[in-house]
Image (spheres, helix red, strand yellow):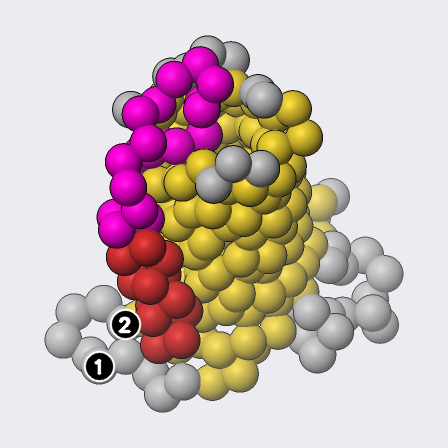
Amino acid sequence: MKKIVAMLVAGSTIAIATPAMAQSADDPFTGPRVEALVGYDDVKAGSSVDDDGNENNDQSIEGVTYGIGVGYDVDLGGAVVGVEGEWTDSTAKTEFADGDFEGFGFGRVDAGRDLYIGARAGAKVQPDLLLYAKGGYTNAKLNVLANDGVTEFDEDYNLDGFRVGAGAEYAMSENSFFKLEYRYSNYKEGEVDFDGTLPDSERFDVDLDRHQVMAGFGLRF
């Protein structure tokens, strides 16, 4: 996490220190941006927690992910570099199928909010088309639901991991853009966020994969 933060700070410093490049129709990939995001979300139990012994037990939960993103890019000519952050949520959750509980390896869960901070770098293959790769840190939550017949438990797994991805961004004008990207996230550590005055649990190992296909529409300033 410290290495990622240091990298982002360094990238931001470079962006600020770079001589101002006036944004124009010939330079549509420079400056701050804000975007709306929506896409497909597939959260999958990793190999250490999946349930291959029960073919009726779903190995993943799927849904729609949606949210907002912000970023800052610098056009270096043929290349573009930038930093970015996101807040997203998801409708993915475990289901009861024909009376059979599909436990997903984690129990009964809803996918919660997901925070991401990272960097991206790409190449302009056309004046208005950018192909890029991205990577960074992600922190996600799974809301865990349980009931022992007397007490209902409603707690959160707080998960830390990394994200990598690739995509294409098309400059519709000098101030608006559309993008489409695929990203993969992996979570290896987590803790339980207890409500009230109870302290959070000790850190523990998890195994969770996340695949997303995301579309975004944004404005650049």
Rate crowding at label 2 as few (under 14), some (14 to 19) or many (20 or more) other CA atoms within 10 Å: some
Between the residue at mark 1 and the residue at mark 2, the CA separation in whole angstroms equals: 7 Å
- Residue picked out by circle 1: 199
Q: Return the residue at label 2.
A: 194
Circle nearer the N terminus (1, 2): 2
Q: Main secondary structure of the magenta part?
A: loop
Residue 185 drawn at (x, y percent) = 58, 59
Residue 166 coordinates in the image, percent (x, y): 64, 45
Position of the N terminus, as image quadrant, is bottom left
Provide residue 35's location: percent of width, then percent of height.
39, 29
Quadrant assignment, res 131: top right
CA neighbours of label 1 inside 10 A, class few (<14), some (14 to 19), many (20+): few
Q: In this view, does 15 lie above or below 27?
A: below
Q: Position of residue 135 (x, y in %)?
A: 53, 57
Indicate left or right for 97 with 130 as reference. right
Q: Give the residue drawn at x 28%, y 79%.
A: 200
* Pointers 1 and 2 in contact (C-beta within 8 Å): yes
